[in-house]
Structures are given as structure tokens and as C-alpha cells.
Amino acid sequence: MLVIETIEDFRRWRQEEKGTLALVPTMGALHEGHLSLVRIAKTIADKVVLYIFVNPMQFGPKEDFGTYPRTPEKDIEACQKEGVDAIFMPKMSEIYPEGKDNSTKVVPPAFLADILEGHFRPGFFTGVATVLVKFFSIVQPDAVIFGEKDYQQLLIVRRFIQDLNLPITVYGAPTVREPDGLAVASRNAYLSKEQRAIAPRIHQLLQEAAAKLQKAQSKNQDEMEQLLKPIRQKFKEANFELQYLESRDADNLQPVSPQTKKIILLVAAKLDSIRLIDNLFVS
């Protein structure tokens, strides 16, 4: 397995490699969720590349860029065990040579990017889209794999790949969970023992909400809202600062309507300063 740090070296390696290539984008601090994406990547391509880059453009001024967990040695060891062909770990100056504020930006459509996560994290999806387009240009993957835990991100990536006519197939992978239901995430490392005991309530309450919505008489956003009100109250009673709990059309994240084929529940909640997200399809 190669660990490559510069664009020049990566492009040289890419030109020499034959066959199809699948990319797993990450910010490092790898966990079982990331490794599950690597395993999927190995089934769909001849070569697997994982990149590690903590992208400053997707962090707000009061967010945790400086303290975001960074574990490069453990990450390299995990990738070695999983059979990754190359890790691309560029320095900041490689990706933003004139600084992130002076970089050309890729702005996804507002109807997808300015709601839910985008409402609470303005500019977040511009940062995500911009860095991904940069890495797609460098890596030239045939396929890219994302986890469904970041469902809004997955839809936005599919949209801008389509809009920009990029020859890349996007695969979504099921959310990996701990035995108690908590979605695996790098930020779980921030949780204290007490917070870790509370955090699984997110998935439990999503399941409770999904059961209520399955019994709904019609696909109507107003009816969904009434059913979600007591669940939102339960989040507060469990000491979460609830930012959103919403039912949306799983195809486009717009309000549920009679035309909706599949409903998804999406949630963002904070335990003190630690922000956790999750989602659940309503079958």
C-alpha cells in the first residue's frame, strides 16, 4: 500500500495503474463505517483509493476544525489491513495553495443545500462539493462510495456529479451502527461516558417516529408534523438540544406529498457541544 502526499506523485501513480478505481473520501479518524465503504469499494473496482483530508471549507467559524480528531498512524494501519491500494494524504497547501477563501467554489442548488444541515451550517455543502470536485479531478475515480448516515450529502453529491457531467458512479452504503444503535461517527470520540449512554436515544426515537409515520393515514406533511411533535419533546426530555427532526421525501428532501414514494426521517441533535446526526427510512 502506498501513502501519497502530493498531487504530482498521485497523478503519476494514477497514470501507471490499469483497471477501474473506486474512491473512498474521508477526513480521517477512520472507524468501522469508513472501513465498510472500503469493503464495498473492493467489490466494484480493481483498485481502491482512500483519501484523508480535514477540509477547512466545510467548517464554520465556531465549529471544531482545530480539534477534529486526527489519527493518521491508526488510519494507515487500518487501511493496510483492509487492502487499500493507496492512501492520498495531501497537505493543506496542495489542495488550497492560495487559501480556502481564494479558491474557486462549487455551489450546489439551494433547494438541496440550504435546508436541514445547510440551514444550521451555512456554506457547509459548498465546502463539501468544492473539495470533492478537487479530489475527483486529481484521483479520476470510476466510482465513489459514501455512507447513508450523511444522507443529504449523498443526494447533493449525486446531483452535482450529474449536473457537472462527471463520469463517476455514486454508491450509497448503509449506516453502520454500534450494538446499541448509535450511528458510528468520528465525533463519537468526543462523547463522555454519560453522553455516550444517552446518545443511543437518537436511534431509538427515530425508530419510534418511524413506527408512528408508518401508521399515518396519508402522505401529508401537516399530518407528519403532528405525529413528530411528541417525539421532538422526548428528545428535549433526554437532554438533547434538538436542531431538527424532519420527515422528507427520500428522493429530493422536499416536504412529503402524495407523490412521495419513500419517506426518510432526518435528525440533528446536540449533547452539550457535540453535534450528532442520523436518519432512518420509513418503510
Image (spheres, helix red, strand yellow):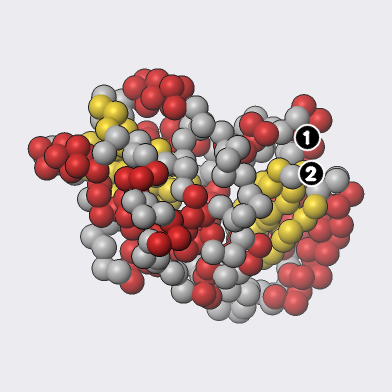
Which mark, by number, is residue 195?
A: 1
Residue at the far front in the pictured view: 98
Q: In the rendered image, is residue 152 in sight? A: no
- Quick check: 247 left or right of 228? left
Residue 135 in the image: above or below residue 108: above
Residue carrying label 2:
272
Residue 105: image x %, image y %? 40, 65
Q: Residue at x 74, y 45 (%)?
A: 273
What amino acid is found at the position of numbered circle 2 in the picture? Answer: Asp
Instruction: Name the residue at 87% across, 57% down.
Output: 233
Pair 2/1: label in front: 2
Quadrant position of residue 253: bottom right
Element under disc 1:
helix
Residue 221: x percent and y percent? Answer: 70, 75
Image quadrant occupied by the N terminus: top left
Asked whether, in this view, residue 159 is left or right of residue 241, the answer is left
Q: Say left or right for 7 vs 260.
A: left
Query: Residue 238 sits in which quadrant?
Result: top right
Evaluate if marks 2 and 1 touch, with contact meaning CB atoms under 8 Å apart. yes
In-image side of 58 versus 134 (left or right): right
Q: CA distance from mark 2 to mark 1?
A: 9 Å
Residue at 64% over, 31% down? 189
Picture residue at 50% right of the left edge, 61% below the top: 125
Marking on residue 208: none
Mark 1 residue crowding within 10 angstroms, few (<14) / some (14–19) / many (20+) = some
Furthest-right residue in this view: 237
Question: Quick check: 121 above or below 53?
Answer: below
- Secondary structure beneath disc 2? loop
Q: Amino acid at mark 1?
A: Gln
> Which of the image's four quarters has the C terminus?
bottom right
